Image: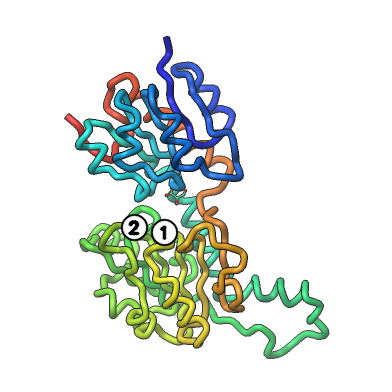
Amino acid sequence: MKPEVYITRRLPAAAMKRLQEFCQPEIWDSDELAAPYEEMRARLPGKAGLLCLLTDRVDAALMDAAPGLKVISQCAVGYDNIDVAAATARGIPVGNTPGALTETTADFAFALLMAGARRIVEGMDYVRGGHWKTWGLQLLLGQDIYGATLGIVGLGRIGAAVARRARGFNMRLLYHNRQRHPEYEAELGIEYRPLDELLAESDFISLHLNLTAQSRGLIGEREFNLMKPNAVLVNTARGGVVQTEALYNALKAGRIAHAALDVTDPEPLPADHKLLTLPNITIAPHIASASTETRSRIAMMAVENLEAGLQGRPLPWPVNWVG
Ligand code: DGY
C-alpha cells in the first residue's frame, strides 16, 4: 500500500506524475483558492505526508490532526506559514525549495525596480485612459537607474542575484544583513551599512528578508522618514516586513516616490484596498518566482522532499533537524 498524502494545490504535470509513483495523493483541486484551514484539518487524519504552499497555515493543531504525519514539504522557499518548532517537537521533518527560484525572483525584483523607476504602469494607465494627446517633454518623468544607489536589505542568495543584475547598470551597491558577507563584498563590491544609513543613502531599496518575529513590520513610519523623497521601495520578500499603513501614508504624502511590490499585507490584497487608490505604486500578485521552469522545478523539489520523508530518509532540502 502506498502511503496517503495531502496536497494543498494541483502541481505541474511532471510533479503529479512523479508523486503518483510513490504515494496516494489527495488533492485540494483548485488553482483559484487556497485550501481552507478546516478542510486541511478534516483531510489530514490518516495521512503520512503533507505537501503545502505558503498560503497554508500549518500549526501544531493541524499536525496533531494527523498523528502519523511523517513529513511536511513546503512548495516554496519561505516557510513562515509553518510552525517549524512545533514540527520539530513532534519529530516531523520539514522541507522547502531553496535555490531553485533565486534567479527568477531576482529577475522579477529588478523588473519591479525598473517599473517603479520609470513609471511603466502609470504610463500604461495613461495610454489606456485616453490621455495620450502628444509627446510630452515633462510627461511621466521618472528617475535614472544607472549610477543610482541600490540598498539591499537581506543579502542572501536572491539579494546577491539582484546585486549582480544591478552591477550591469553601474549601480552603487549597499547592503544590510544580520551578518556581514565578506565574500559578497569582494565579489560584488557591495558595502555594508547599518539599516538606518542604508535607508538614508539609497535611491532604490530592495527587501530580501525572511518573515520572522524580528523582521515583521521592520519598515514603518520611522524608516520611511529616513528614506530619500525619490526612493523606490521594492518588496519581493514578504508583505509583513513592511507596515502597510505606514507605506500608504508615505506614498500618499510623497515621502517616497514609489513602491513596487510582489507581496503585500494582507495578501491577497482586496480590490478595494486603499493602496490601490495610489498612482505611485506597482503591485503584482506574488508572482516573482512564476516562470514555467522555476515553478516546475520547485514542485519537483517539494515532491522529492515528500518522498524522502515518507521513506524515513533525510530530506534533500531540510528546514529543521529531527532526531
Ligand atoms: C517563496 O518561495 O517563498 C516565494 O515567495 C514564492 O515562490
Which is more N-terminal, label 2 or label 1?
2
Name the spot of residue 184 as percent of width and height, x first. 29, 60
Q: Which residue is mark 2?
A: 211
Q: Amino acid at mark 2?
A: Leu
Q: Around disc 1, counting alpha carbons within 10 Å, would you say few (fewer than 14), some (14 to 19), or many (20 or more)? A: many
Q: Residue at x 56, y 27 (%)?
A: 14
Residue lying furthest bottom: 138
Of 10 and 45, nearer the camera is 45
Type of the residue with mark 1: Ala
Q: As rendered, which of 185 and 94 lies closer to the eye?
A: 94
Q: Are marks 1 and 2 in contact (CB under 8 Å)?
A: yes
Horizontal relation, residue 236 to residue 220: left or right: right
Q: Nearer the viewer, residue 323 or 104?
A: 323
- Give the Cα separation between the discs numbered 1 and 2: 8 Å
CB of mark 2 near ligand 1 (< 8 Å)? no
Q: Secondary structure at mark 1?
A: loop
* Residue beneath disc 1: 237
Give the residue drawn at x 44%, y 79%: 203
**Which labelled disc corresponds to residue 166?**
none
**Image quadrant in which the C terminus is located:** top left
Helix, strand or loop under label 2: loop
Counting from the top left corner in percent of width and height, residue 316 is at 32, 31
Give residue 111's quadrant in the image.
bottom right
Ligand 1: does it lie within 8 Å of the C-beta at label 1?
yes
Residue 282, image quadrant: bottom right
Quadrant (top left, top right, bottom left, bottom right) of the N terminus: top left
Spot occupied by residue 96 in the image (x, y as percentages of width and height): 37, 40
Left or right, residue 24 beside residue 176: right
Among the 4 quarters of the image, the one containing residue 66: top left
Q: Is residue 170 above or below residue 256?
A: above
